[in-house]
Image (cartoon, rainbow, N blue to C red):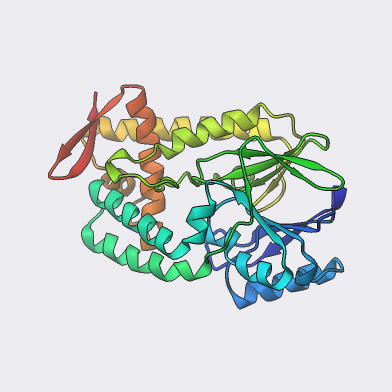
């Protein structure tokens, strides 16, 4: 791979499939993202490092792009074995240090969002149990080198500028190598699938009735990335992105089409976000319930922002109606 960056695809238990970790053969020897906390993933990572002549113990720096378990799960284990510094967005550090409590609060936030938007209580309760079990794929870690947005991460042979690009998660961080015109992008921009802007509890906390408008935040982040002069984006899943502006424009049009479709459903009759999701996709798998709800809420937020629809809260459930 060019400029000493090697993609290490690591298996995950999630529907997205393998996660791309990246070995940066520079000084310090660096790993970007870690894979989930599992013996299988660790074994595959050890094997991938060995294919490039390295061991876990050789790592001197580990960089995290965002808070999702497939990207942070092995972080503390690798740090303890290697003595590497752990670098992540400064705002993510407290969340990561208190991982179990952070996830509990995030799950409670998501449960309240689901109930407020019409997801039945039994579905919400069942999904909460599933997500509680899934926490084991992540884990707490101590960030030793907090990164500030706009700051720099220096190597012997390159410098990365740190940019906070929230939307897919509250902590999405990308790293820009201006000299090589490359971006280490995590899940901010993926070629073969559209990154789902999950409705997530803000890193500093927040109330469900004041939920962040994740899709609008994400579109703002994509617009900022579109203006960057890069030839290649190293993606968190799948192949590198080589024409980021065309892909971002395609994603913007996709979201417009989905918003128009949802506006049509609301025009037929007032609906909750869950009712909209059911109308669009029919029976929804339990594990996809929050993903689809986030998808609907993101596009409804676009319609709310334009004054095309209004919220009507009855008995604690939000329904959307034509303005």
Left or right: residue 213 compared with residue 136: left
Q: Quadrant of residue 233?
A: top right
Of 60 and 17, the residue lying toward us: 60
Q: Quadrant of residue 78?
A: bottom right
Task: Provide residue 67's location: percent of width, then percent of height.
Answer: 53, 54
Q: Residue at x 61, y 38 (%)?
A: 149
Residue 249 visible here:
no
Which residue is drawn at the image coordinates 52% and 58% (left, top)?
A: 96
**Residue 104, position in %: x, y?**
37, 61
Q: Nearer the viewer, residue 266 or 217?
A: 217
Q: Vertical placement of 64 versus 219: above or below?
A: below
Q: Indicate the quadrant containing the C terminus: top left, top right, bottom left or bottom right.
A: top left
Name the residue rendered at 39%, 49% in the picture: 292
Residue 300 at x, y = what percent?
35, 34
Q: Residue furthest front?
A: 144
Horizontal arrangement in the rendering, residue 319 relative to residue 95 (left or right): left
Which residue appears at 41% of the width and 44% of the height?
295
* Foreground of the two, 54 or 294: 54
């Amino acid at each position: 791979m060019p400029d000493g960056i090697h993609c290490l695809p690591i298996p995950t238990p999630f529907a997205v499939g393998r996660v791309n970790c990246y070995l940066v053969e520079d000084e310090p020897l660096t790993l970007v993202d870690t894979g989930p906390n599992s013996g299988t993933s660790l074994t595959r990572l050890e094997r991938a490092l060995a294919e490039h002549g390295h061991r876990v113990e050789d790592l001197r720096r580990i960089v995290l792009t965002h808070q999702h378990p497939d990207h942070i799960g092995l972080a503390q284990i690798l740090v303890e074995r290697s003595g590497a510094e752990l670098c992540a967005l400064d705002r993510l550090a407290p969340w990561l240090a208190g991982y179990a409590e952070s996830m509990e609060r995030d799950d409670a936030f998501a449960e309240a969002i689901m109930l407020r938007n019409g997801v039945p209580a039994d579905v919400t309760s069942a999904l909460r149990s599933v997500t509680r079990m899934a926490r084991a794929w992540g884990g707490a870690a101590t960030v030793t080198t907090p990164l500030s947005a706009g700051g720099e991460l220096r190597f012997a042979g390159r410098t990365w500028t740190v940019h906070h690009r929230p939307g897919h998660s509250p902590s999405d961080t990308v790293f820009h190598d201006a000299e090589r015109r490359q971006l280490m992008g995590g899940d901010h921009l993926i070629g073969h699938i559209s990154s789902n802007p999950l409705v997530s509890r803000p890193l500093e906390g927040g109330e469900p009735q004041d939920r962040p408008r994740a899709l609008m935040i994400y579109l703002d982040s994509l617009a900022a990335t579109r203006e960057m002069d890069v030839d290649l984006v190293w993606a968190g899943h799948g192949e590198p992105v080589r024409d980021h502006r065309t892909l971002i424009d395609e994603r913007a049009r996709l979201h417009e089409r989905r918003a128009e479709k949802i506006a049509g459903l609301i025009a037929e009759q007032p609906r909750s976000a869950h009712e909209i999701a059911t109308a669009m996709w029919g029976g929804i798998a339990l594990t996809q319930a929050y993903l689809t709800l986030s998808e609907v809420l993101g596009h409804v937020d676009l319609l709310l922002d334009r004054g095309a629809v209004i919220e009507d809260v009855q008995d604690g459930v939000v329904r959307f109606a034509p303005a």
